[in-house]
Amino acid sequence: MKYILPLIINRRRTNYLDLKSKASQEHESFVIELPLMDNPFTILAIDKSKSMQALISNASDISLHHIHFSASFDESSQILSIRLSTSANSTAIEENSEEEIDWKNPSRTQPKPKNVAAQQQSSFVLGQIKYTCLDSTSEFKIDGSYVDHLPDEPLKEDFIRCQFIFEANAKTYQSELHFYLAHASCFHHFGLDFGSESSQLKVSGYQSVGHHYHKKTKSKNLFEMVKDFKGMTESNQDFIQHEPNTDFIKSIFFLKKRLSDFSLKDKFIKNDDELKYLVQKNELNSSLTNQFHQLSNLKLAHKHGEILRFMDFQSVQGERVRSLSMDDLKNQAYSTILKSFIEATLQNVLDDECQNNYIRFTILVPNIYSTHEVANTKTVINDIFSKLQHTAAYESKIRAWEVVTVSESDAAFLGYFDQGMHHINPNKYYIIIDCGKGTTDFSIIQTSSNNAKKIKSLYRNGFAGAGNLISYAFFEAMIDFVIKNASNPAATKAFFETIEKAEKAQMNTIFEKLEALKFQYSNKSNIAQRTVENNWNNAQSGDTTLKSLANSEITATVHNLALLLQKVDGFYDWGGYIENACEAITSNIVENIKGVINNIDKSIDCDGILLTGRGFLFKPLLEKLKGRLTTELNFAPNLIKMPDEASQLKAICLDGIFTSGYVIHPELVGFPIHISTKKQAPVNDTSKPKFPRFFDFILRLANMQDNYDETKNSYRIDNLDSLKFLIGNTLYTVADNIFYDTKWVESVDLIFTKDGFYARNISKDNKVIGYSNLIQNSAIDNVTLQYLIPSLFPAKIDTDYIQALKQDVPESIEEDKELADLMSLLPD
């Protein structure tokens, strides 16, 4: 039972505050960057055009125009109390609110409020800061300003507790937030992209120049920082995690199969030698693979840990040995790697003399993350800073921190404009597609009618499947060439066995060559096929050729395969795997955004389709997507933009983290799509590859009639034939079965909370009759696995996904008959 109060923190991020009847012991903290000029700054604001929403039976949402805010400061406890009360004399807005008009029609005049109450103001002084609480007709806000002058050093009174109290129906609902005011001399902003293929980090801070401070943002070489932190002095070129000519560190990690003194209650891997994130090339041998498992893409393992059960581990505590899976260890491994990245950065950035530093840590997250996975990421990072704060090395250095998560595609949008690559205009919408190695993420963002820097997301989503999926398609096509020329079944079986048992160094060589061959990929034509196949057939090492490789158990080795691949040029799509991978990725993108675009106000034009991510370095994927955007969605080709430099395809997302002047939504990533049972028209185009059922489900079942409204935090469900939703490429359903009783249900809407999305049954007099959380609807099917596994594992280095593809589907929850009926409506 709670009310949800929408806030804007520091004019830069939204926050949905839970007002609960039972006070929480955990409070979110925010770092407020003090301005360099003697100007007021806003700590928090509440937009009165919005509503405070109820998750309480028989309660109603309350328009914030009907809320009176009163603030009082207790000097003894240093607590700022903000009391909310309903008032019959509060401002009423005619017709559409100012917020609605701002997004819909620039020509309409603003509504004039009736019974306008005079704004109320109170203030108090704490140390060098004067705090002003202002309750006006349009918003309630808390501003800060300097009492005398710009402070030369960090504030002594830098902390303020802010309590929110609302009384309704003889009950008290409350919550608390903590704010830390950071002087320029000790403020640091870290931005991390923990990538599927590689990770990168930037740092923003202030440099003292005379009596003034200048803000600078610069990229840090994450590989070198981690290497220095670990005290390693070998050449960068000796490590498999080193990526030449970049500041990245490759996301290749190894976890020991037998862990000493490990408990599932532990938040980190205790022993440094049991988790390797710096491995020299000469270590890639059977000794390493016998003792260590290579970890999957940890970003996706958060979401799909259950399919990693085949990776077996053991915890050894004295004489007790306990079996574990990667699903059991994914959080601890992720936390330990992040902790090393953070410690390496702190060691590099913080001065020995500088005490009480304030850190804002922003991490990019894929759009397939659920609210719970976003919250888990924040919890992991908060645990890291909490642990570091209580160590001797950092107990006096870390005063406070704030953790922010940002959608990868939203950050790419902000990066485009931060770098001046595209001009942003008011009353337009923009499509951003970020295709990396592990995931493809996309956003549709609208600018308001009067302010190009006021933005809202119309849609965010994504899926597992990007560059690694294409890399695996190259691997499959190569195997197809070898097998189609094989005539000895026993030798062929032996060849597959050698691949599964291959040492990491050998597979690394093979995938490095396949990555290089991506840029020699041939178009589908008989001449191109003959040319490439002649080259491959004639590739020879000693008496062994590629054509005859799998005809003898003696020659059918990974070592020979690696040698022969070095002698080939060109590549052909044997088996059509590459074409099918590109088709799957582009179809998923286009079909996902099609419904949203159809629902956008026709008076608002698309002003740019912005492409980012290193997946688009593969030109056939890029050209196929461009073709579908122009032919199927009727966008002009000149709307499609990409960074001029290949290095910016990945770096641009981090640039967006440090862009100022925009308000972002850091907790909500994937948007919900209501899934209707309305049968779709059959697809008669036989020229396209036949898609697996998984993609049929995504592409054809989403029959969008309306979009989730981020500004209102509402998704009204008019068609109640189904209460199933696609969020972040995962299917969810309403948990409470009573929502399927048509006699009980009157009107359903979906709202976002910190605990995830909730469905509410709303009566005709706008009271909440009941509410329910959403639960994941079904287990992963075989086809999903075939697209997910190559994205989970860094294809350059490992073949564990071959084993994963052989596994049975994880034990599913009880079969959902309604889902089966829903699926049966799909056209063949």
Image: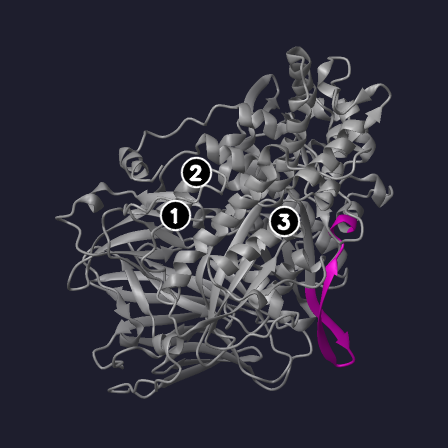
The amino acid pointed to by label 2 is: Phe
In this rendering, the answer to whether 807 lies above or below 140 is above
Disc 1 vs disc 2: which is toward the camera? 2
Q: CA distance from mark 2 to mark 3?
A: 23 Å
Disc 2 vs disc 3: which is toward the camera? 3
Viewer-side residue, 231 vs 12: 12
Q: CA distance from mark 3 to mark 1?
A: 29 Å
Q: Secondary structure at mark 3?
A: helix
| Mark linked to residue 726 | 1
Q: Secondary structure at mark 2?
A: helix
Q: Residues within 10 Å of mark 3 (few under 14, many from 20)?
A: some
Viewer-side residue, 505 vs 346: 505
In the image: residue 727, left or right of residue 629? left
In this rendering, the answer to whether 696 lies above or below 362 is above
Residue located beneath label 3 in the image:
620
- Give the mark nearest the N terminus, 1 or 2: 2
- Residue depicted at x 62% and y 59%: 653
- Residue depicted at x 51% and y 55%: 628
Give the quarter of the image for residue 321: top right
Residue located beneath label 2 in the image:
694
Disc 3 vs disc 1: which is toward the camera? 3
| Residue 500 can be seen in this image | yes
Question: Which quadrant does the C terminus fall into?
Answer: top left
Viewer-side residue, 628 vs 386: 628
Which range is magenta?
204-224
The amino acid pointed to by label 3 is: Pro
